[in-house]
Image: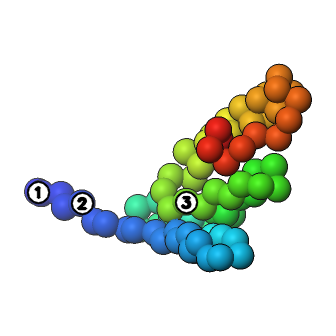
Amino acid sequence: MSYERIGTGATAVGIKTGEGVVLAAEKRVSYGGFVMSRGGKKVFTIKDRFGLAFAGLFSDIQTLNRTMNVLIHSYELENNRPISVYSA
């Protein structure tokens, strides 16, 4: 018996305009061919200045989102000023 990998890609997109940025991602959360949820949150706001959109493993984005929030908050407390986009 042979096994073949099946691609089950997801979509996330970011568009930069002169006035700001638009982030979007589909809400479907799947594991292989099984759809676990049709309402998963895949676009996050970090500190009202940063955005994060993803198409990948849900646990990875949750960890990345939490880590970025903690690191940005820590930077702002230590430096007593908002973090810049370049520093983030």
What residue does disc 2 label?
5
In the image, taking residue 31 as reference, residue 49 lies left or right, namely: right
Q: Nearer the viewer, mark 1 or mark 3?
A: 3
Name the quadrant of the N terminus: bottom left
Q: For the residues carrying marks 2 and 1, which lies nearer the camera in this image?
A: 2
Residue lying at 83% horizontally and 23% vertically, measured from the top left: 78
Query: Label 1, label 3: how many angstroms apart (C-alpha)?
Result: 35 Å
Reading the chain from its start, which is encountered first: label 2 or label 3? 2
At label 2, counting other C-alpha atoms closer than 10 Å, the crowd grade (few under 14, some 14-19, many 20 or more) is: few
Disc 3, SS: loop
Residue type at mark 3 is Phe
Q: Secondary structure at mark 1?
A: loop
Residue named by callout 1: 1
Q: Is residue 33 visible?
A: yes
Tell me which amino acid carries mark 1. Met
Quadrant where the C terminus is found in the figure: top right
